[in-house]
Amino acid sequence: MHIKDFPKRLRQLRAKLPELSYKRQKNVWAVIFLMPWLIGFALLFLTPMVRSFLYSFYDLTPRAGEILTEFIRFDNYLYAINEHVFRNTTFRTELVETTFNVVINLPVLLIFSLFIAVMLNAKFKGRAIVRAIFFIPVILNSAAVATALESGASFSAMLAEQNIETIFDLEFYLLQTGMTPALISFIVELIARIYSILALAGVPILLFLASIQSIPKHLYEAAKIEGATAYEQFWLITFPNVTPYIIVVIVFALVDTFLTSPLSLLITHELNRQNWGLSSAMAWLYVATIIIILAVIALLAKVLRIGGSHYEN
Amino acid sequence: MKTEAVTKIRAAAKAFYRKNTEENLVAQRSEKLTHIVVSTIRYILLIGLCFVILFPTIQQVLMALRAPEDVNNPAVIWIPETWSLMNLRIATLVLDYWNALVNTFKLSAISTVLQVASTALAGYAFGRLHFRGANILFFLVILTIVIPPQALSLAQYLYFREIALIGREGSIYLMSGLGMGVRAGIFIYIFRSFFRGLPRELEESAIIDGASVFRTFFNIMLPNARGAIVTVSLFAFVWQWNDAYYVKIFEVSTAGFPLLTMRLVNAAEAMYPALFYTGALELIGQNIWENPLFLALISNVAALLMMLPLLIMYLFVQKQFVESIERTGIVG
């Protein structure tokens, strides 16, 4: 190396140095930031998960003071898929049904909750009250409350007795207008579905609302000056900024639907009957189904370029 | 002559001015019209949906305010004949309401703080600190979201028994602090998406000013993440409040430390003993507590009482939601 080049070389090094060390700094800090989660994962998640995975290949029989184990390969899985029957349903039917329900409901849920979130974001009188009302499904979505309301099954029978279960008999009125039965059953089912969608949409609405509100305001101001309509503002500003959350909402809705489905109850039921091997096998089939659905969605998102951050590129 | 000309000019000017304003008015009117139409449609939709949400709740509130004697009085459909707070009083006794409320609030508040701290850190690491192996680790986060909690409960129970945390609130705090609390994986995901969405210029300008990674996170990213923090805190609080699962397997709710969810679930499963042991039976006559509908009514009222504090809390938190817009407005 020539002496003459030295200052130049030093400058180059200096320019390189902070960048490199910053990157390394980032790696160090990543470990520190992840430390609580890593410890939690190793202590509270990894062992139970591995153990449950191993159980799914064994037949476990509790005897006095010990547990007999017998390696049975995929028998638990085969039994869960082919032979399992509980009351009037089987594991397989519930698995297929839940999967179909989710796949059909997800797009409706996404569009609906984004639409509502945009509406709740606009300024209007009584906004605080309306937002509070839309929060009610989030609160009511709880196992404890469900148990309490379930024990009131006789209660709803009583309501039916007093004819106040339905506010008015929609089907009856529609029949009188002379519509076709197919159309009527469609409308009635749609209205019945609104509540179930609303119940699931509580969390997605809040997530979308939060992400819409974190969009820098100056983007909208600039758009207004340029004469963009509300419609254009939605597609060019709101939507691209909200997309990273769409995947989060999908994950949430997917997991929540599976968790509150009869599938989850079947797993718990087998667990309580001490069929640990079978229950673990069922849990892993359940996990595999969700992960496959997620993988398909992730692939679709990549093809359609949804979900990448607006700023990152 | 001169005055005539002046008046003519003035008249012309006036006519011109009038014409101009009339055109303006027409434009304004059409703008106003679309505004009215849009807001009418919005109100009709929102009021309809609010009604669908509120209808069952209103029904239950009105049921709750009936006198216990009227529980299946066919003459009472909507408005109670005799208004009474007796059902509420019985439900508060059954839930051990005030004690359980304080405990549940404490448990939820502490675990919320721990959850937000642990998941925000992890979320930032995944979203912003592009480290090696991030994708594999994030797949593990997804796995923690996806695996049904009951599949892990047995092994977790055994572990907590080993470290003597069964029957103590500490078990919940440990889970929350280590990022394994109620749906912690979703929170990590939310924070990751949020931090990714923040403009890169923020970080770059911090680097130029010589800020370290931690300072960039703490002084620049975190204040801008207010929206995400408020959202996650809200969910963490509500879900901890409503959690009956972890609280049950770790046996956190005891006679000395009652929690709302467990009191509610236990009472709903066996209402008569719950009424008996809390002395609520003495408040009402036999002909009433022998009525199964009355028992069902009390569990409904108890559920309402459990929800009420959350709704009140939300009304306050909502202001934070609005403020977070103005804050992030500065960013740009």
Image: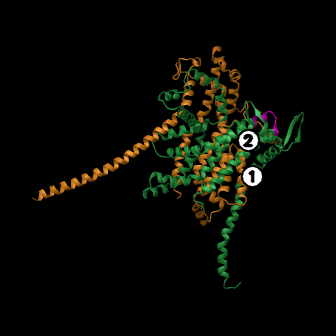
Chain colours: A green, B orange
Which chain does the residue under circle 2 lie in?
Answer: B
Write down the residue under mark 2: B149
Magenta region, residue range: A267-277
- Chain for mark 1? A
In this orientation, which residue lies closer to the viewer: A83 or B45?
A83
Number of numbered markers: 2
- Where residue B320 appears, as percent x and y from the top left, is 54, 46
Judged by its main secondary structure, the magenta piece is helix
Residue sitting at x 76%, y 33%:
A85
**What kind of residue is marked 1?**
Leu
| Mark 1 lies on residue | A38
Q: Secondary structure at mark 2?
A: loop
Give coordinates of residue A37: x percent, y percent: 72, 51
Residue at the location (70% across, 28% down)?
B266
Q: Residue furthest left?
A: B1
The N terminus of chain A appears in which quarter of the rendering? bottom right
Dot 2 amino acid type: Pro
Is residue A185 inside the magenta stretch?
no
